[in-house]
Image (tube, grey):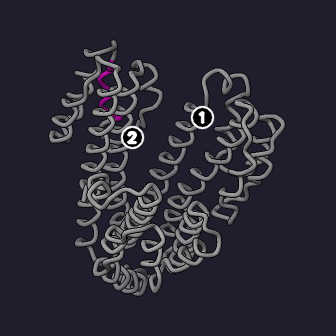
Amino acid sequence: MSRVSDYAYINAMLRARIGIMRSSDIIENMIKAPTLVEAVSKLDGTRHQHIAEVYRKTGDLEAAELSLIEEQIASYREVVPYLPQESSFFMTVLLEKIEIENLKTAIRLWYSGAIMHRSISDRAKYICRTLIVHSIDYDRITNASSFSDIISAVSGTPYHDVLGSFAFESLSASGLFPLEIALDHLWFSRLIGAAKRLPSVDRKLAEAIYNVDIDLKNILILVRYGYYYHLEVESLAAAIIPEGYIGGEFIRRGVHGSGDDMMASIKNIVHRRYPAISDEIDHIRRTADDFTTMEENARQIMLIENYLGKWRAKAYQRLLLGKPFSIGVVLSYFFLERQEDSLIQAVLSAKSYNWDEGKIREALGL
């Protein structure tokens, strides 16, 4: 089949939806709403109406947010059948990201109960039990009597070997950070592998956009864990995703040392590709641990996250304006959909804490 026949119908449908999203005032109306209840009501008559219905029925904001995840899953499932085989596989691997985050949530609950000895009975209901990609017994995970039970619960999935490389003793000693990083690495590796299976035009588009995504993820790892939590270089090297420019340079240069020397090397790597971000890093102070400095650093990291978000949005905008009969429109659509969903979730959360309009706009970088 030709590229036109492969993408003509689905791209036309998604471009129409993109037009509706861009013309929508839903986020603006929610921000201006004086209360959480009124903000929720702004979802009526939109593709998110079910979220409003769940909230009105339960009064439970987290239950409403769970329905937002279920909407995302349904959206992927709707689009994938219209795509050619390799593109369909690539989009399925993209969907695995939601599954991995859901798996992390289940494992965190188990960890909280089994290792931290906290009650999880009121939290388990917020795990998504809708089939995402692979069959996973989430209840078996949260109620596991041993870590081997968790490994068995993901048998037959890509996550089995990753979880199988950990043990109860190591998790008790080091926490879940290494395991969660390993799952992230697995997903990016699978994503890059799936991109290589795409036809040439689609492969170049996918690799270009997700190499940027990997870079931005790595910058946040370096800033958040290097500057803010003062991790040593060995721990940072284990966390860094090896693909992309930033990860590749970090490994190629063999960054070493600690403290300011290490951070200077990191800043130099970031500056070569993303100079504006390296300037922002200068404002983060590493020397003091007083509350004021920690608060200032948290705010600065939030600004960097917002800046990276805008950079990412521009990359997807270029995709949308590029080759018309390619996977670019599909990728742009799902980015815009996730972006809108994230904003809805953020606004609802802010309203639940009675944040005013100005504080919400600052937090969202609007």
Q: Residues within 10 Å of mark 2 (few under 14, many from 20)?
A: some
Q: Find residue 243 and name its label.
A: 2
User: Is 248 colored magenta in this rendering?
Assistant: yes
Relative to 242, does residue 135 appear above or below in the rendering?
below
Residue 91 in percent (x, y) is at: 50, 65
Residue 20, compared with residue 166, is above or below; it is: below
Name the one closer to the observer, 357 or 285. 357
Q: Position of residue 216 (x, y in %)?
A: 32, 45
Q: Is residue 275 magenta?
A: no
Q: Main secondary structure of the magenta part?
A: helix
- Image location (x, y in percent) of residue 340: 38, 67
Q: How many circles with numbers are drawn on the protein?
A: 2
Query: Residue at coordinates 35% horizontally, 85% vertically from top-left?
Result: 16
Task: Please give the residue where the numbered disc 1 appears in the rendered image.
Answer: 179
Contact, CB < 8 Å: mark 1 with mark 2?
Answer: no
Q: Which residues are magenta?
A: 247-255
* In the displayed structure image, the side of residue 97 where residue 281 appears, left or right: left
Numbered badge on residue 12: none
Q: Quadrant of the C terminus?
A: bottom left
Q: Quadrant of the N terminus?
A: bottom left
Q: Amino acid at mark 1?
A: Leu
Q: Which one is in front, 203 or 317?
A: 317
| Horizontal and vertical percent position of residue 208 | 30, 54
